[in-house]
Image (cartoon, rainbow, N blue to C red):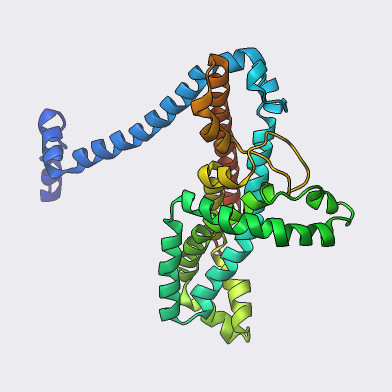
Amino acid sequence: MSAAATTIAHEVPPQAGPRAFLRRLRGGDEIAHLITLTFSALILLITSMLVYELWANSHLSRAKFGWMFFWTRVWDPNFDNFGAAPFIYGTLVTSAVALCLAVPLGLASAIFLSELAPRKVSDVISFLIDLLAAVPSVIYGLLGIFIVVPVMRTTIGPALIHTLGNVPYIGALFHGPNYGVGFLTAGIVLAIMVVPFIISVSREVLLTVPREQREAALAMGATRWESTWKVVVPWARTGIMGSVFLALARALGETMAVTMVIGNAPTIAASLLSPGDTIASTIASQFTEATGDLYLSSLIELGLVLFLITFILNGLARILIVATGRGGGRPA
């Protein structure tokens, strides 16, 4: 028998049992595994408990209204008649308006800060943008009350009614009385709130694009803007979409700022100038006033509806990011 065979024959198999487990514990691997597994399971547990509490405490509303709760347009606490349709509508409309305003502004600002601005200027402005992202929402609400609402009432609203009010199809969005508060005002305030998130995340993503990609495009004869728009932005599209959906999640759940400028009217109106309400603002403004069990249960079911909307939209966002991010975010 050769020396190699003798060595193989006398090799000791890996030890298993309490001693081996204690040895791995002393090495730190098992401890790190257990700690990270516990924290991951804790996140799932908290989410499950949240869903369970919302589901269990909304049983009165679910039992009485059923699926009609989603499309009933009446919200009348005096007669215990509750429907979530006006608040679902207001939540989706204000979030859509916010994204329509914030995404072009945020993406353009991120491109300027990452590709065109001098590095020192970019760093200073980025620091200020990060500070804006940390401002409490009630401050934005005060900004909306004292600045956006008066401007909407005296300038922007009349201008939109005069210029677009009679345009076919579009005119319905800017028709009717202009109170200053409403869906459009809430959307503008939300856009101001979420644009720092889009700028900050998109800038960091654009800065991660390899320099070789820019230099290759310039070497092929592309201008600075062409290399940015046709090479850098497509390369970073997955991260940019992630920043957009992060902003969407913030817009869907925003409470105080929206409550202060939307008008708090449970109505569904085509005009963006009309007052309305959202799910989060309704819960915040009426929860302490809910005296009956059915009233309280309906508000809790509104919270469950908001959770479902957030879950569905974020799931669709994840699918969209995966679909567009194949190939590592590289342009096709």
Q: Is residue 331 visible?
A: no
**Relative image position of residue 107 (x, y in whole percent):** 58, 65
Which of the 4 image quadrants contains residue 30? top left
Quadrant where the C terminus is found in the figure: bottom right
Q: Is residue 235 visible?
A: yes
Q: Say left or right for 76 vs 269.
A: left
Q: Residue at 62% across / 49% down in the picture?
A: 186
**Relative image position of residue 38 (x, y in whole percent):** 29, 34
Which of the 4 image quadrants contains residue 16? top left
**Relative image position of residue 284 (x, y in whole percent):** 51, 34
Q: Residue at 59% across / 82% down in the picture?
A: 224
Q: Say left or right for 95 vs 211.
A: right
Q: Nearer the viewer, residue 309 or 315?
A: 309
Q: Nearer the viewer, residue 206 or 37?
A: 206
Q: Nearer the viewer, residue 246 or 76?
A: 76
Q: Is residue 75 above or below residue 156?
A: above
Q: Residue at 59% across / 59% down in the picture?
A: 147
Q: Is residue 226 above or below residue 9?
A: below
Q: Nearer the viewer, residue 285 or 105?
A: 285
Quadrant where the N terminus is found in the figure: top left
Q: Say left or right for 130 vs 266.
A: left
**Relative image position of residue 204 (x, y in whole percent):** 45, 65
